Amino acid sequence: MHIDIRRFASLISWVVSPVVVAPAAYLFIVLYGYRGEPRALSWFYVLFASATVAPMMLIYGLKKIGKVSDYNITFREQRFLPLLVLVGVNVIGYEFMKQMGSPRFLSGILLFNAVNTVFILLVTLQWKISIHLFSLASSIALVYLQFGTPMLWLLLFVPLLMWSRVYLKAHNFMQTLVGSMIGFFLMFAELKWWLAL
């Protein structure tokens, strides 16, 4: 059976993309980590709006007016504006979560999404880090923090996505490796510190 490798790599890149992976992690965390909480779905909606709805609408709008050339924002120079807007979106989401009395873990997700987006934004001024890998690895760090060591099997998706992004020539190997390593360890360290306060 013939397999179109490029199509397969593209499928992986879309399925394991930030707007899919992050909300899947949030839904899993909220449904299983906070089951029985009457406001659990409301907390998820804020996370979902910040991680998926806002970025998708923003990128669609920027593509429509020609500010970005494609939905993956392949060119480093085009990433500054959307990343800057997403910092604001996550800060607003964090404030919403605080007002809704969400658990510190959940509000911390949005706070450090904003902080980490600033980090990516600064890196982007000089270098093109893989946001796909950063998002996947940081999402795995969240699930690991919430549910423990058994969730580390999810790291198997990291080399698969790395291969996909490199094969599609969206990134080189180092851009994917650095994105995944910093994404995991930064989110892990930040939330461990946040929860210990």
Image: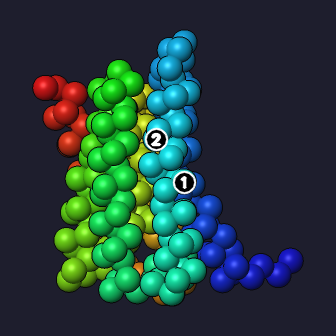
Residue at (29, 47) in percent of width and height: 91
Q: Nearer the viewer, residue 38 or 65?
A: 65
Quadrant the N terminus occupies: bottom right
Considering every residue shown, the one lying at the far right of the view is: 1
The residue tagged with tag 1: helix, strand or loop?
helix
Q: Is residue 118 above or below residue 21?
A: below
Query: Residue 122 location, x and y as percent?
Result: 19, 71
On the image, numbered disc 1 is attached to which residue?
53
Query: Residue 160 location, x and y as percent?
Result: 53, 65
Disc 2 marks a residue whose amino acid type is Leu
**Residue 124, image quadrant:** bottom left
Disc 1 marks a residue whose amino acid type is Val
Quadrant the C terminus occupies: top left
**Residue 176, image quadrant:** bottom left
Residue at (48, 61) in percent of width and height: 55
On the image, numbered disc 2 is attached to which residue?
47
